Image (spheres, rainbow, N blue to C red):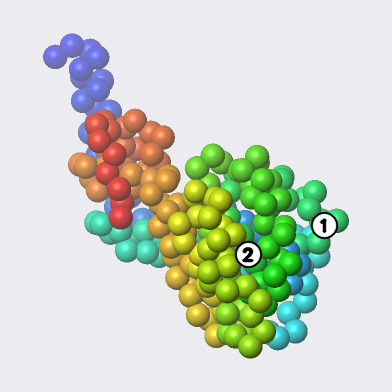
């Protein structure tokens, strides 16, 4: 066995020992999610319901930028996948719009909200999408969220109206209808997006079943070369 082969064999053994040592350690993967939409569409209420399971009728409007952190675990093909979501809430007023591009940078997902009780909240959607596309990752997960569906008597945007409006976006395959007041579909919306984040960013090692970044050509835990990408889900 020549020197290079001995060194490679030693490296593989070291990585295997390290992997076994880390096997019981929970690895928390961190991802950034941004929440966009016009003023008073319910961005802060959506976050409060998801992160703290609360709803306040008199929720104060966000001034500039707000931030929340939430840990979530989803079921993977071989094991549970734990993630830390860093969720950024942006004020919908025009005067704060200049802050948004800087915070959109590095985001893995974006929720774009409109209020089903106010048709005029649709008019800013194109601007939010444009800013996100220019400043975030090219593979960012974008999800359209319809809010306040519990207020049926005040509804101005029907499901059909929304589908027609968002048809121009080829990435918009589904509009998630939510109510922060009742909690309807709020958690489902985040879980759906988290699964897309996992698909976009992670892969499973065929040898050790560990999850690691799709950009890597070798497993960071056991050193196995990536021949075929295996989804963690």
Numbered tag placed on residue 94 in the rendering: 1
Closest to the observer: 90 or 22? Answer: 90
- Say whether residue 173 is visible: yes
Q: Eyeballing the image, is 43 above or below 154?
A: above
Residue 24 sits in quarter? bottom left
Q: Secondary structure at mark 2?
A: strand
Q: Residue at x 67, y 84 (%)?
A: 154
Q: Eyeballing the image, is 15 above or below 42?
A: above
Q: Quadrant of the N terminus?
A: top left
Q: Looking at the image, do the residues carrying marks 1 and 2 touch, with CB atoms under 8 Å apart?
A: no
Q: Position of residue 11 (x, y in %)?
A: 28, 28
Q: Position of residue 26 (x, y in %)?
A: 38, 58
Which residue corresponds to mark 2? 113
Q: Position of residue 89 (x, y in %)?
A: 68, 62
Mark 1 crowdedness (10 Å alpha carbons): few <14, some 14-19, many ≥20: few
Q: Quadrant of the C terminus?
A: bottom left
Numbered tag placed on residue 63 in the rendering: none
């Amino acid at each position: 066995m020549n020197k290079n082969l001995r060194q490679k064999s030693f490296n593989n053994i070291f990585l295997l020992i390290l992997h076994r040592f880390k096997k019981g350690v929970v690895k928390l993967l961190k991802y950034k999610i941004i929440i966009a939409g016009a003023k008073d569409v319910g961005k802060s209420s959506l976050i409060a319901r998801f992160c703290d399971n609360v709803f306040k009728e008199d929720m104060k409007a966000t001034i500039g930028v707000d931030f929340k952190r939430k840990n979530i675990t989803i079921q993977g093909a071989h094991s549970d996948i734990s993630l830390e979501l860093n969720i950024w809430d942006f004020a919908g007023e025009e005067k704060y719009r200049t802050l948004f591009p800087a915070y959109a940078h590095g985001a893995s997902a974006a929720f774009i909200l409109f209020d089903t009780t106010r048709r005029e909240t649709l008019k800013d959607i194109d601007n939010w999408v444009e800013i996100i596309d220019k400043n975030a990752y090219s593979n960012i997960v974008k999800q359209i969220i319809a809010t306040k569906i519990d207020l049926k008597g005040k509804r101005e945007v029907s499901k059909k109206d929304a589908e027609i409006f968002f048809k121009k976006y080829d990435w918009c395959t589904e509009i998630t209808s939510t109510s922060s007041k009742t909690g309807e579909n709020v958690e489902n919306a985040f879980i759906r997006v988290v699964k897309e984040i996992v698909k976009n960013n992670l892969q499973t090692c065929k040898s050790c079943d560990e999850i690691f970044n799709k950009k890597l050509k070798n497993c960071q835990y056991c050193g196995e070369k990536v021949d075929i990408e295996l989804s963690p889900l």
